[in-house]
Amino acid sequence: MRFRRATRQHRLFSFISQNWRAKPLVSYRVIVELISATTTKTGLTVRCELDTGQYPSGIVISDTEIAAINELIAEVGDGTQG
């Protein structure tokens, strides 16, 4: 499952990087717009928005919490199926 997700992510980011090749990434807005403008011949479109929220740093997640997250992903999927 992880290999398939990694392959899809690689293909997605390959198209994104082709889209912004030789364009200066001068601001977050430019980056978001270039990512959002990414499409493929097979109909893939990318939705992107900048998250400007403030988040605390230094939070430690226990092994038990990670295991619970992994179990949930195994139960409901990680969004890459299909």
Image (cartoon, rainbow, N blue to C red):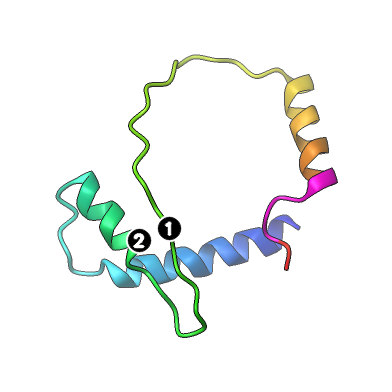
Residue 4: x and y in percent read: 69, 64
The answer to which quarter of the image holds residue 52 is: top left
Q: Which dot marks residue 1?
A: none
The answer to which quarter of the image holds residue 34 is: bottom left
Quarter holding the N terminus is bottom right
Residue 7: x and y in percent read: 61, 66
Asked if residue 47 lies left or right of residue 81, the reply is left
Give me the residue at 14% from left, 50% from top.
26
Which label's residue is closer to the chain start, 2 or 1? 2
Residue 75: x and y in percent read: 85, 44
Q: Which residue is mark 2?
A: 36
Asked if residue 51 lies left or right of residue 23, the reply is right
Q: Amino acid at mark 1?
A: Arg
Residue 24: x and y in percent read: 15, 59
User: Which residue range is magenta in the image?
Assistant: 75-80
Magenta stretch: dominant secondary structure: loop
Give me the residue at 44% from left, 15% from top.
56
For residue 72, above or below residue 40? above
Q: Amino acid at mark 2?
A: Ser
Count of numbered labels shown in the rendering: 2
Task: Say whether marks 2 and 1 touch (CB < 8 Å).
Answer: yes
Asked if residue 80 lies left or right of residue 50, the reply is right
For residue 50, above or below residue 25? above
Q: Residues within 10 Å of mark 2 (few under 14, many from 20)?
A: some
Separation of disc 2 and disc 1 at Cα?
5 Å
Q: Given the current orientation, which residue lies at the most extreme bottom position?
A: 41
Task: Name the residue nearer the viewer: 10 or 74.
Answer: 74
Task: Name the residue nearer the viewer: 3 or 35.
Answer: 35
Which secondary structure, mark 1?
loop
Give me the residue at 73% from left, 68% from top.
82
Q: Which residue is mark 1?
A: 47
Asked if residue 51 lies left or right of residue 41, the reply is left
